[in-house]
Image: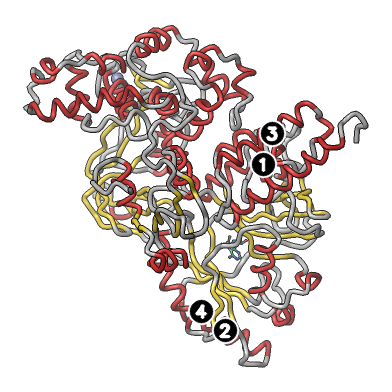
Amino acid sequence: MDGKIPPEVIERAKKLREELNYHSYRYYVLNDPIITDREYDNMLKELSALEKKYPELITPDSPTQRVGEKPAEGFKEVRHSARLYSLDNTYSEEEVLEFHNRVKRLLGTDDIKYICELKIDGLSITLRYESGTLVLAATRGDGAVGEDVTANVRTIKSIPLKLRRPLDIEIRGEVFLPKSEFKNLNDERSEEGLPLFANPRNAAAGTLRQLDPQEVAKRNLDAFFYQIVDPRRYKLETQWDVLAFIREIGLKTEPHAKLVEKTEMVIDYWEYWQKEKHVLDYAVDGTVIKVNSIHQQEELGYTAKSPRWAIAFKFPAEQARTKLTQVSFQVGRTGVITPVAELDPVELSGTVVRRATLHNFDYILEKDIRIGDLVILEKAGEIIPQIVKPLSEVRTGNEKLIEPPERCPVCQGPVGKGKEGEVALRCLNPACPAKLERRIMLFVSRDAMDIRGLGGKLVKRLISTGLVGNFSDLYKLTPFELAQLGTGIGDKIIANLLREIDNSKDKPLSKLLVGLGIPGVGKKLALDLAKHFETLESLEKAKIEDLLEVQGVGNELAENIYNFFHNEEVLKELDELKKFVNTKEPLKKREGILEGKKIVVTGTLKNYTRKEIHDLIIALGGEVSSNVSARTDLVIVGENPGSKLEKAKKKGIKIMSEEEFLSTIKGENSDDLS
Ligand code: AMP
Ligand code: ZN
């Protein structure tokens, strides 16, 4: 290393790297952070500053090096050191018993234990570490040759760039896109007129094959691991030990794997998770049953395609059949016209489905869907109802083709394709009230300015009467105007609404940015932008290269943001808005409702990830701690809470469910935490 760097700086950088790697392991792998996000960010900033000053300090495993440059010539091919097999699979209990009998016969013993794991619906990945440093990540490909996706996999925060031991090792698992991310991604793509991903697996695959690691980093991929090549080398005797070892060296395993003593229990496990899979934030399409003993696995060996010691026991796809009665058209914020199938109501995976998106007209043609068809429905990634196919064999001849609208269904304006090669049809009228309506709905939504009581009907009315033509008009509404709308809303509701509008003026910049609907800017990026630029003015003035400094902003996005803030209409509207709303991101918490409170979270929450709830607590002035002690003020309890709940009960510490906590911080209940 360069002699000019003072030794204490070298030491400090090393220490920071180690600390940061350790804390991101606690956070992303153990899900049990022991420092606050702010402390983490401060260390990261310090390391970045040192590395900026002394670039020679940068090591490949530095946490600042997750997002790299685009590889110049696409993905290279990689020949795998050991084949990546696929799995035999079955949907039936009998075949599972046959599998068990075959294993018994081949091994010549009854003494067999199995591990049940969940089958993650993502894509296989293999990682190679040398002396503990990540050197290669590759996709399965055809099993013998895959693609080098190292630059993209480095952006996955739960995958360590450095293991907790300096091992030479190859580890295999599954990369996936959390369901919540999948939904956000498709919502955004639909607004931007891009084709939607059919399910989380396709979305994960599409993301991993993106050429720009900056884009990949934005998508929050995650990964679970379940296999080590040559486990004997590490003295591992069972699959159970393999899983423990994987966790020990710093990677994540799916937390619900189970060692079963009795063979019937593999069926119980499958039945249980078939019902309960909806609670997980990742798609699982079945269970995998594996012989636990590595010795027995070796004895059983492989067929040409798959191991003889494992079988995938898949969940049946939940489907329903119903009639498509009508097609309606929705006009989005950017004018994208989306055809929507109106269905005879039918129950599917626990909800009643009445509508399903048809995405775009290419999709309708490809599937040959017609009005009047009987169709098969499925939920993509257990979330969004999709039409799998029409039952064309039972057509009566009275079905009608679905024609693209010649004019915008809302404003009768002209329609066309926005850009060359785009699949979506758009309303081209810039003044289309449907677009305005969607923009206003986004502006007032929870993640944005959070103005309650302004529903779709009222917004429509405000637009059609000309009272609202842009965001700033909301702040000019008077009680008199609202009363004159003829929607029959009473004085009390009007007063509440005006108070909500008034309250929204104090929202932090990040929320305003979400509300503006900048192409490609969602909740997370809005927060990063707001933290980075601190004021709307400095964001407006930002050059492309300034924008590129923000984590997760690639070229395309930087250009989108830049263009947005260089559009005359936008600037005019922003100048108007500035008269009413706060345009700064508070550096300190503005609402001190949790000031000085020490809070512990345990279990899985419905509305928040761990990181989100921690951010929220800190934003409200609280402190997050990972262990319950006498100094703990509150324990928030989600599903499957750990021992922390017991501890809190014993110590008599205040306990709240997620819902109670949320309504308390919203001030909706009198429980004031004091
Ligand atoms: P399939 O793609 O249906 O042939 O299933 C085989 C694939 O399932 C493997 O190649 C893995 O990518 C994936 N998989 C997901 N979860 C697991 C697991 N727990 N154990 C083994 N394979 C898994
Ligand atoms: Zn229109």
Question: Residue placed at 64% from the left, 90% from the top?
Answer: 105
Q: Amino acid at mark 4?
A: Glu
| Residue at the spot of label 3 | 46
Of mark 2 and mark 1, the one earlier in the sequence is 2
Q: In this rendered view, identify the residue nearer to me: 104 or 185.
A: 185
Question: Residue placed at 6% from the left, 27% from the top?
Answer: 488
- Of badges 2 and 4, the one in the foreground is 2
Q: Amino acid at mark 3?
A: Glu
Q: Amino acid at mark 1?
A: Asn
Q: Is residue 406 above or below residue 387?
A: above
Mark 2, other Cα within 10 Å: few <14 / some 14–19 / many ≥20: many
Where is residue 527 drawn, in percent x and y?
Answer: 49, 31
- Of badges 2 and 1, the one in the foreground is 1
Question: SS for tag 4?
Answer: helix
- Of badges 1 and 4, the one in the foreground is 1
| Residue at the spot of label 2 | 100
Question: Residue placed at 61% from the left, 74% from the top?
Answer: 310
- Of badges 2 and 3, the one in the foreground is 3
Of mark 2 and mark 4, the one earlier in the sequence is 4
Of mark 1 and mark 4, the one earlier in the sequence is 4
Question: SS for tag 1?
Answer: helix
Q: In this rendered view, identify the residue nearer to me: 21 or 10.
A: 10
Mark 1 Cβ and ligand 1 under 8 Å apart: no
- Asked whether the residues under the numbered discs 1 and 3 touch, taking CB atoms below 8 Å apart as contact, a structural biologist would say no
Q: Disc 3 versus disc 4: distance between alpha carbons?
A: 57 Å
Mark 4, other Cα within 10 Å: few <14 / some 14–19 / many ≥20: some
- Asked whether the residues under the numbered discs 2 and 4 touch, taking CB atoms below 8 Å apart as contact, a structural biologist would say no
Q: Disc 2 versus disc 3: distance between alpha carbons?
A: 56 Å
| Residue at the spot of label 4 | 95
Where is residue 180 drawn, in percent x and y?
Answer: 44, 46
Of mark 2 and mark 3, the one earlier in the sequence is 3
Q: Is residue 560 above or below residue 379?
A: above
